[in-house]
């Protein structure tokens, strides 16, 4: 049986960028570009018409509705559709707003082809993906934010704390499994338990907790 292709919608208001992204992705046997959109309203219209859509690759600056608005609407109505932000901006307010809007990944436009493909594969596997520069900005943004009233009251096991450290260091499920000598399935179970215990939705919440409690230290903030 032929493997199911990853269905991607591209959204940017610059035709040259769309053409470049389409060229990169169409060279991959497992990725199918199923649409291109030039403004935020067109993105939402196409998402409604593409029931098997997997990922929207979205710029922040879009006419009619910007990337933050579009992300919120997609994630509230079609939570199974992954949103990958591809932007030239690495400003704190953009990163914070997009993470809190529910974006699944965020990389910069100066990232290479390999990082774009890594991000797509991570999202398809159910893992968030933030580029290294975006991760640093997230940490700077949330380092002093008070997310948990009593963070030390959250009862994480030592193994879960190890997983938290690795998640904050951008390790994938496979990498965490290798480092801790456990199965990927066990890593997924730990992830779900951590999110449940912390009452957070994504990696950003885990990073906030880890910074506030000192589980992760020594970053170049």
Image: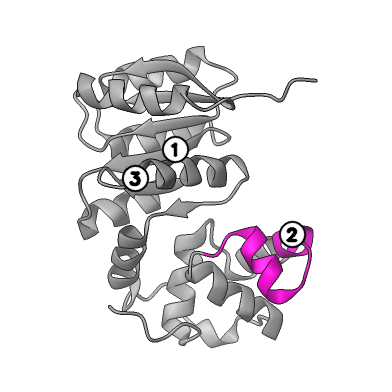
Identify the image quadrant of the C terminus. Answer: bottom left
Q: Which residues are magenta?
A: 171-189
Identify residue for label 2. 184
Relative to 20, is 59 above or below?
below
Left or right for 12, reference 124 = left
Foreground mark, 1 or 2, reads 2
Residue 211 visible somewhere in the drawing: yes
Query: In the structure shown, which secondary structural element does the residue marked by tag 1 occupy?
Result: strand
Q: Position of residue 219 (x, y in %)?
A: 35, 80
Query: In the structure shown, which secondary structural element does the residue marked by tag 3 occupy?
Result: loop
Relative to 192, is 152 above or below?
below
For this rendering, which residue is in front, 172 or 158?
A: 172
**Earlier-in-chain disc, 3 versus 2:** 3
Residue at 20% x, 34% y is: 61
Q: Determine if the magenta segment contains residue 71.
A: no
Q: Which mark identifies residue 112? A: 3
Q: Are marks 3 and 2 in contact (CB under 8 Å)?
A: no
Residue at 42% x, 82% y is: 212
Q: Position of residue 29 (x, y in %)?
A: 57, 25
């Amino acid at each position: 049986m032929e493997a199911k292709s990853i269905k991607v919608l591209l959204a940017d208001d610059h035709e040259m960028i769309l053409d470049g992204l389409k060229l990169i992705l169409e060279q991959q046997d497992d990725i199918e570009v199923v649409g291109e959109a030039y403004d935020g309203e067109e993105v939402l219209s196409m998402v409604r018409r593409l029931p098997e859509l997997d990922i929207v690759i979205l710029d922040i600056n879009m006419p009619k509705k910007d990337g933050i608005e579009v992300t919120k609407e997609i994630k509230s109505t079609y939570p199974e559709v992954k949103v990958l932000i591809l932007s030239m901006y690495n400003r704190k307010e953009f990163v914070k707003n997009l993470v809190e809007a529910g974006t699944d990944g965020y990389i910069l436009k100066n990232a290479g082809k390999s990082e774009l493909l890594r991000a797509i594969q991570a999202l398809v596997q159910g893992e968030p993906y933030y580029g290294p520069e975006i991760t640093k900005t997230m940490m700077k943004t949330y380092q002093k934010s008070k997310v948990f009233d009593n963070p030390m009251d959250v009862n994480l096991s030592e193994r879960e704390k190890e997983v938290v450290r690795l998640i904050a260091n951008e390790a994938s499920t496979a990498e965490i499994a290798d480092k801790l000598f456990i199965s990927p399935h066990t890593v997924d179970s730990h992830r779900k338990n951590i999110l449940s215990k912390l009452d957070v939705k994504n990696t950003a919440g885990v990073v906030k907790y880890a910074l506030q409690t000192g589980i992760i230290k020594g970053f170049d903030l």
